[in-house]
Amino acid sequence: MEQPIPILDLAAQYERIRSEIEPVVLRVLESGRYIGGDECRGFEQEFAAYCGVAHACGVANGTDALTVCLRAYDIGPGDDVVTVANTYVATAEAILLNGARPVFVDVEPETGTMDPRRLADAITPKTKLILPVHLYGHPADMTAIREIAERHGLPVLEDAAQAHGATLQGRRVGALGHSACFSFYPSKNLGAFGDAGMVTSGDRDFIDRVRCIANHGTTTQRYEHSVVGTNSRLDAVQAAVLRVKLRHLDGWIEARRGHAQAYSAALAGIPALSPPSERPGCRSSWYLYTLRAQDRDGLQAHLARCGIATAVHYPKPLHRQQALAQVPPSGELPVSERLCHQVLSIPLYPELPEEWRDRVARETRAFYAA
Ligand SMILES: Cc1ncc(COP(=O)(O)O)c(C=O)c1O
């Protein structure tokens, strides 16, 4: 059997940047400052500048970024947040952990992101916020979503956990809504060596509120707590690592784009397959390369027999999850339901060897030629 192909290889990335990473980690270890401090402030400033937004606050992970952010909007029991059902569970968890209700709208089949044509109907007097997800690295249609949000006087919070560096009309995600949440989970395009997250916003007061809640409701004075907060702070080691990796992010996204283009060229013209595409004006950060495939399970089994790892993002829409059984139903979500049976992510990471990528494409074509 040929060598197995993983869906992702974080050790390969580490090998390439080891000489840049190890000194900065040691620097933090020797500094005696392990939470907050210069590394964290430095990373917040650099990441905010990268996104093209004025302010950022580091937190412990992407789920906390969303949860704390929603608290900073004062969202709680009796409030609705409009979002999507085909996303990682954390998007809805953050809403539910604040006692609010997620209201799901359907998504565009091509990108899996919130369909703005479904949005207006989901908005009621209970709606407090709109939470689109930039799925697989592709920006949601923020122009249309913001227009509807502005008409209703609602803030838009971007779930940008999967999309660092993606752009819409040349502007990066993180600067497209009133605020945005990022995850630096290790597998993300910009990933830590553990958990980490970030909230970005152009609104200084808002970021101050996020920072206060994420640090036990502490005001500027130590041991003064203005609200009940939580412990969700960024580690200095993670911040130091992320500062190094941020310098590589655009290059990594370009490498991902190159692989994505090669896959799309190699997989064109197969009636049973729809390769992912970019909406005009958008540049995906290609966090995932997710096909829509007829007989998806057959294709996945075939690739597994060929030693090629794949994954389904996501096999069940959130409104079908047991954890959300008590949530009152939203409207019909036919596209979200259908996508769960069609989607398949194939190996994509900057260091993916070209021969492996070509083998994945060849075996995928072979399945449908049989
Ligand atoms: C869309 C989305 N939102 C939120 C999160 C939560 O991020 P974290 O795993 O850092 O808590 C993730 C992480 O995988 C995600 O993919």
Image: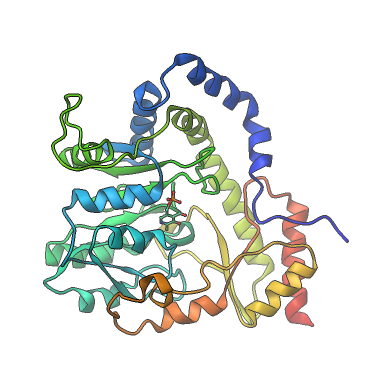
Q: Is residue 313 visible?
A: yes
Q: Quadrant of the C terminus?
A: bottom right
Q: How far across and how far down the image is residue 3, in percent?
A: 83, 55
Residue sitting nearer the eye, 313 or 221: 221
The answer to whether 96 appears left or right of 259 in the picture is: left
Whether 174 is drawn above or below 40: the answer is below
Q: How far across and how far down the image is residue 24, in percent?
A: 53, 22
The answer to whether 272 appears left or right of 139 in the picture is: right
Residue at image location 31% in from the left, 50% down from the top: 180
Residue sitting nearer the eye, 229 or 201: 229
| The quadrant where residue 223 appears | top left
Q: How is the image coloured?
A: rainbow
Residue at image location 64% in from the left, 28% down from the top: 18
Q: Is residue 173 visible?
A: no
Residue sitting nearer the eye, 140 or 105: 105
Which quarter of the frame holds ligand 1? bottom left
| The quadrant where residue 304 appears | bottom right
Residue at image location 29% in from the left, 58% down from the top: 97
Q: How far across and how far down the image is residue 35, in percent?
A: 39, 27
Whether 319 is drawn above or below 164: the answer is below
Whether 345 is drawn above or below 367: the answer is above
Q: Quadrant of the N terminus?
A: bottom right
